[in-house]
Image (cartoon, coloured by chain):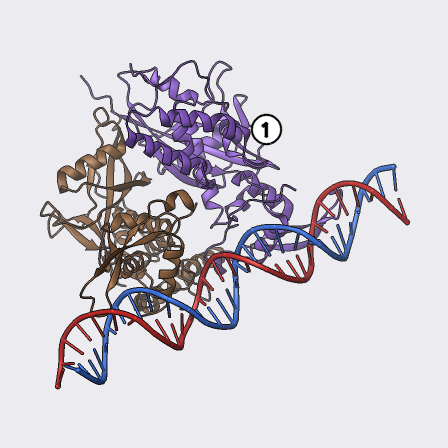
Chain colours: A brown, B purple, C red, D blue
Amino acid sequence: MKAPGIAVGLNAVILAVTRETPKILSLRPSPQELDTLPFGPLDPEGDRTLELTLRGWVRERTGLDLGYVEQLYTFGDRDRDPRARAGGPRVLSVAYLALARQAPPSGAETAVWRDVYQYLPWEDWRSGRPEIVEEVIGPRLKEWTEGSETTTLRSERGLRVEIAFGMAGSDWDGYRVLERYELLYEAGLVEESRRDRNHAGRTQATLDPKTPTLPGRPMAMDHRRIVATALARVRGKIRYRPVVFELLPSRFTLLRLQRLVEALAGVRLHKQNFRRLVERAGLVEGTGAYEEKTGGRPAEFFRFRREVLRERRTAGVGLPTRSVDPS
Amino acid sequence: MKAPGIAVGLNAVILAVTRETPKILSLRPSPQELDTLPFGPLDPEGDRTLELTLRGWVRERTGLDLGYVEQLYTFGDRDRDPRARAGGPRVLSVAYLALARQAPPSGAETAVWRDVYQYLPWEDWRSGRPEIVEEVIGPRLKEWTEGSETTTLRSERGLRVEIAFGMAGSDWDGYRVLERYELLYEAGLVEESRRDRNHAGRTQATLDPKTPTLPGRPMAMDHRRIVATALARVRGKIRYRPVVFELLPSRFTLLRLQRLVEALAGVRLHKQNFRRLVERAGLVEGTGAYEEKTGGRPAEFFRFRREVLRERRTAGVGLPTRSVDPS
DNA sequence: ACAGATATGCTCATTTTGAGTATAAGTGAG
DNA sequence: CTCACTTATACTCAAAATGAGCATATCTGT
């Protein structure tokens, strides 16, 4: 029997934000199939570096010229792909995060820009704690915790739930996106985990197949996990590196900048303090120009101050501890 | 001609800290050869997950039971390995960071624990700005910058040097470990870059082969780059997650904790403020026990307060902006 | 008992946050 | 043209966090 070998694929989470909505580029080969992330194989002989390869086929297939690109994570579990042929090669995916300045018409007709929060609805706290957390996730995770076989397991699960979702007194931490997804997956609350369990003869006794899964659009393979990883990374990164500006045009109003940060962080911010923060940190500088037609006082256009990189060691929008101001 | 295929290897940067020195486990097959990181192949059929595989062979070969493990980065450039056979498979390395509580006698006789700063001497600022930065790196990078072919390139290089090494007024940022290494590599100041350039017919006109490279022990392939990545990750992570405690025994004095953080961050801290920070953050709690024989007043033993995870969203030792107190 | 070494406690000025209030400068309806 | 409404921007103020020291406690060794 011949060794099936290894294949390496590259996945991209391409993120763009239009006004208030963070979007990623998804492929949907046909209405019957699940969304997937853009994916391309690595040619071991031809392609010189992983990143260049990724940029190349994204340009080819979607017409997008990626700006900022960073490696996210490499997913290599043997049973990642429930549909993989038994004798086929093992597939490793190296996932990348890319930031795009706008979301153009999406090249291929199977490619669509989709709101990230369609996939992870429980991550958007901009209008306060989402109902789904209170009403569905909370109780279901409680069931799951209490259905533990041992007391050790039970208290371990309890702690994880509490930390990840800020259940008891503990507060909600925006960066724990992946922890939350993995918890929901383990508890069998997302479609992917049902699907994976029905494969390879694995069954799960504690799981009641009749309880519906959570709202939130599923994806093929482990792609939703990859999206969660990407969101976690972005949320973490904006605090200490000025990556947000990769998602904005060169001139923007402070409100637009704020809405962008809010869209990514999934949280509302206090306007006056945000302005103060961003100005005092030297992240932006005013151009003399003003935006017309705001429906109120005109807003000044600002630009990113590149010099800030030289001056401050940590140049991000340092999100406040508490979220605020539902204005 | 048959396709050479892809092989995947796993690399581990295993970090332990003995009192004041951060150490990693290196392999040195023979005195003539360069140090390498512990490395093991992935069996595409047998191994279920990458992380378990890594833990497995580390246990096998070094007897170490790894505690905390996290994926670092995947290195996949085609020409990573200058010694690779022309027709051989393309090798991807998935690098992991592991934290070990102590540094036991190092199992195999080819395995040695080595001070991280032997590899990256310019990263240790605990006794102030290292001479090597002032006297060697500074001038050499200046030469390199000024030797640029175009003005654009020149100012680009200038900016990068300034930011990475805190050259002009800008201050030194502990987390930019990788940026610094890559800069030195590009400028031809580390042995690895000389070696790589002499391969595959690549030559580099601007490089004077007579200028000696910097002090700092070289490694095989791109392993030193991996070490730099690991150090950068640890330095970043200790700020917001309580990973330091993975490197300590269950009971420790505050000074020991401080020395550990200093060893990793490469910077001295103000003792009283460090204590205040760590106590007020609820990271530790006193056991009633005291350390004897300190040569002064006995120090209380503390333990990590696990509950902190539940309470605070960001539970790290939040390094101060300025370093201080050469006590 | 005293010098020397650590550990630990406390103070104080400064800076950074969180949360508001106040004012400026547009728009559209009547 | 004035008024209600909107959005932008400026300031204020208390609370918390941070950077730097000084002071005191408790050991060891002479």
Q: Residue at x 19, y 43 (%)?
A: A38
In the rendered image, the quadrant that contains the C terminus of chain A is bottom left
- Left or right of A103? Residue B298 is right
Give the residue type at disc 1.
Answer: Pro
Q: Nearer the viewer, residue B164 or B5?
A: B164
- Total numbered labels placed on residues in the image: 1
Pinpoint residue C12: horizontal percent, then vertical percent. Answer: 63, 61
Above or below for D11 versus B52: below
Pinpoint residue A254: horizontal percent, then vertical percent. Answer: 29, 59
Q: Residue at x 33, y 62 (%)?
A: A267
Secondary structure under tag 1 reads loop
In the rendered image, the quadrant that contains the N terminus of chain A is top left
Q: Nearer the viewer, residue B203 or A31?
A: B203
**Residue B181 at least partly seen:** yes
- Tell me the residue that label 1 is attached to: B105
The quadrant in which residue B249 appears is top right
Q: Nearer the viewer, residue A108 or B201?
A: B201
**What's the chain of the residue with tag 1?**
B
Q: Counting other residues with Cα less than 10 Å from the Cα at mark 1, is it few (<14), some (14-19), or many (20 or more)?
A: few
Above or below for A248 versus B205: below
Q: Nearer the viewer, residue A168 or B232?
A: B232
Pinpoint residue A17: horizontal percent, then vertical percent. Answer: 23, 54
Residue furthest left as drawn = A109
**Residue B253 at least partly seen:** no
Pinpoint residue B296: horizontal percent, then vertical percent. Answer: 76, 45
